[in-house]
Amino acid sequence: MYVTMWIQLKHIGSHCVITRVWHQRKLFRNYACLWRVSSRLRELRVFSNDSKRTHDSPCSFASNSAVNGNGLRERPPWRILFFGTDEFAVESLKALTLSRDSSPKTAVDTLEVVTLPAFLSKELPVRRFASQNELPIHDWPHIGPCEQFDVGVVVSFGCLLPEDLILKFPYGILNVHPSLLPRWRGPAPVFHTVLNGDTETGVTIMQIRPKRFDVGPILIQDKCLVQPHCTAQELGATLAKMGAKMLISTLENLPERIQNKKEQSKQGATFAPKISVDMSWVNWEDQSCDQIGRLFQAIGSRISLRTLWMGDTIKLLDFVGQNEIPVVSESEQQRKPTPGSLLYHKESNTLLVCCKDGWVGFRAVKLKKRLSAADFYNGYLHRYFLRKSERQQRECLFQTYKPEPKSVKKRKLHQQV
């Protein structure tokens, strides 16, 4: 009797659910419980009198996916566990949610979300979106069993997934990566694309492998041009939408894409480490106008560029590129000013700074508070320009920050101890 009912339950496409209960030996301890489950399924018209499930039933556990003898789905829609944290990841999660809610379902059957715990991440964009759309949320790393999922999707998650977790997904775990791998492996590919001045980038959909980031086989890649003067924030938004579309396309053709996957090239691999405050210091002697401009476009939306003024840190805001700054007078150009020298252009309210090969501008700075270029000139520069002392003129510079070598730091620390 049990075997007959087991076969009937398998016919409705709920093999994954019943298998899990069967192995836990909870449902089959009580014959009456099993009978009630079977009767309820019949009442919901999940399967017909000949024990074949109806494809148009809204109560079907497995939609229209073909399930082989091992309970493995052979075609979409899939049961997906999503891993993500930031705004870039939200775009893919939106696409998955829309696919799940569409009729008929072409890519996603069920969808659950893994993100960082709330007390660590405050209100991460992925957690906020999942809550607003009533998606089940799991706090990393306590995600529970994964046998009910067909495939995982990880987008901008930042945590290395262990091998035993990856192996629980029949189709593995897919990653949406915003670069043309193997170029710019690592956590900050968009920032380094802009910082390096790349004219072309794209999105890679790949299968992840354990122990190392971004080294798995490629399922699909697509290219796009990097627009001139594009910021990392703008480029990231473009690639996020592009990646979301590519993800849905990949899921709709997943078995074929996996069959035709290819390993990454061993040539041309570069690493994109996380951005940090150390990257924001401007080197007036060594960096060109273009390099300073790309630095601002890459990190300026998150970390302000900075330099030293009279020994204090000053943040440089509202960057003006070389092509947009006012024309510097011929007499000033002939003087060959020292890198870091300052000029104030009253008509455009711009603070001009001399660098390796020209001038760049800033319309505001921040010492203790934000100051316009005019306020900074009136409060800190004007009195120096009124005096003709050569020493004071030399002090009236933005100075390059030069961190102490590690050996010097260790020696000072040892002396203090």
Image: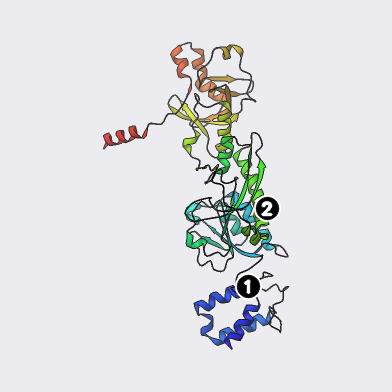
User: Which is more N-terminal, label 2 or label 1?
Assistant: 1
The answer to whether residue 257 shows anywhere in this view is yes
Q: Disc count in the image? A: 2
Residue 217 is marked as none
Picture colour scheme: rainbow
Closer-to-camera residue (168/119):
168
Closer-to-camera residue (376/242):
242
Locate the N terminus and report the quarter of the image it occupies.
bottom right
Q: Residues within 10 Å of mark 1 (few under 14, many from 20)?
A: few
Which residue appears at 62% of the width and 78% of the height? Answer: 10
Tell me the kind of residue under disc 1: Asn
Provide the secondary structure element on which disc 2 rests: helix
Residue 68 is marked as 1
Q: Where is residue 258 in the image (x, y as percent from the top left)?
A: 62, 59
Disc 1 versus disc 2: nearer the observer: 1
Q: In which quarter of the image is residue 67?
A: bottom right
Locate the C terminus and report the quarter of the image it occupies.
top left
The answer to whether residue 142 shows anywhere in this view is no
Provide the secondary structure element on which disc 1 rests: loop
Give the answer, above or below, for where 160 lies relative to 196.
below
Q: Position of residue 392 (x, y in %)?
A: 45, 15
Q: Residues within 10 Å of mark 2 (few under 14, many from 20)?
A: some
Which residue appears at 28% of the width and 36% of the height? Answer: 414
Tell me the kind of residue under disc 2: Lys
Q: Mark 2 points at which residue?
A: 245
Give the answer, above or below, for where 329 lies relative to 376.
above
Which residue appears at 41% of the width and 31% of the height? Answer: 403
